[in-house]
Amino acid sequence: MLDESLRSLIALHGVGETRSGGILIVDDEQPNLTVLRNFLEAGYRVHEAQAGEQALEIARVADLDVVITDQRMPEMTGVELLEQIRDLKPDVAGIVLTGFTDPPALISAINRARVFRFLKKPWQPDDILEAVRQASEHVYQTRAIRKLVGLLAKRTDELDASLVQVRSAQSQLLHLERLGTMGKLAAGVVHDLRNLMVSLGYVESVLEQRGVAPDVMESVQVGMQGVGNLIHTLETMHQFARGGTLTIQKAMLQPSLVVNDALAIARMDMSFRAHKVAVTIEEGLPPVHGDRQKLTQVLVNLVRNAVQATAQWRQIGVEASRKNGHVVFAVEDEGPGVSAAVRENLFKPFVSSKGEGGMGMGLYMAKLIIDSHQGEIAVLDRPSGGARFEVRLQPAEESP
């Protein structure tokens, strides 16, 4: 009998009936088969065979729960038959009818063929019916437990997958909450910067009227441009935090303009001036279809990261070239590189290669911008040490 807790589990998970009701009776004497069939077929679907090979053919194609076989048959004994049927259908219960009681032989048969029950001749119909009932119940229990284990294993896998999704959603919600907070802060900073821009604009006009030295005017204009780009960056962050998307204003754009704009802004940083900068712009580059301000923002971020990763008076590289059908903007540094642990999540929000020294938003915003251009951004190891960040865009004539 099934344990009540197990029966409850089987009912709870809808395992259902696992028995076919099929019984195979095997005896080399037809009268014995007739007798067995007469009192079994009222409750079971009965198959019969008079030899081992015939029984095996039936076992290969029929749905069976129980096999009742005479032990002493020519060519193949009942135990030998059950041993082979066990290879075909391991969960079928075998009952052997025998006129002999030899304990060592019975033990061997149980070990080899997993015989469920031995009945000694002469047997009574009630003995057969009770043995079949118990064997059928055993088969049901065995199959139900196996099916239950399979269902529970599958649901465990589903629960594990669901848990991963829940944790991912929880993490995403946390990111969105933090992005929302940063978006609100960005909006406040933008308001103050716009007031500063008004003052700087007045200073610029006064200096221009008084004819100050060109290098001073250039510094003021570069400063104005830098503040303007900072406003655009903060507005981009605020925009994405509010709606989850970026507004991109695309136009036909020469790659050299992006590089030159980024370097002009980077020169405002005294740390940038304390490094050697190798600039390589391949001649004849095709234009790209992109947002000049936002692509400049990406390149400025990469250049600043390279400056922070590279010791003073060492070299950083800025490049625009064409490779494998893409227009590639690249920034290289001579720093320690990016570890595998950081690289896996480098372009996610609040992940920084600078450890506690960074907010982890620069590369995340860069990826959002490049994704909105249907491009790619990646970090590579330099053979000589350091990191190489690449932005890959389709040329304008090939842009989707």
Image (cartoon, helix red, strand yellow):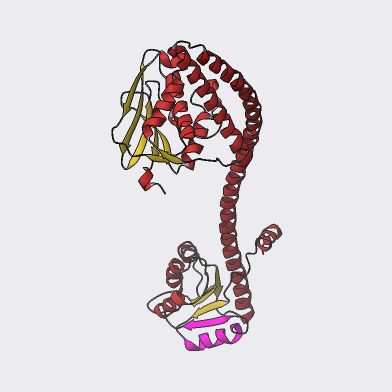
Q: Residue furthest left?
A: 283
| Residue located at (68% from left, 63% from top) | 11
Q: Nearer the viewer, residue 104 or 205?
A: 205
Q: Is residue 245 visible?
A: yes
Residue 275 lies within the magenta run: no
Image quarter of residue 191: top right
Q: Nearer the viewer, residue 84 or 238?
A: 238
Image quarter of residue 189: top right
Residue 41 lies within the magenta run: yes
Q: Residue 108 appears at what percent x and percent y?
A: 46, 63
- Which span is picked out in magenta? 29-49
Q: Residue 169 appears at what percent x and percent y?
A: 61, 43
Q: Is residue 284 left or right of residue 391?
A: left
Q: Is residue 99 left or right of residue 386?
A: right
| Residue located at (58% from left, 79% from top) | 123
Q: Nearer the viewer, residue 102 or 93?
A: 93
Residue 383 drawn above or below residue 58: above
Q: Is residue 72 visible?
A: no
Image quarter of residue 40: bottom right
Q: Is residue 156 left or right of residue 341?
A: right
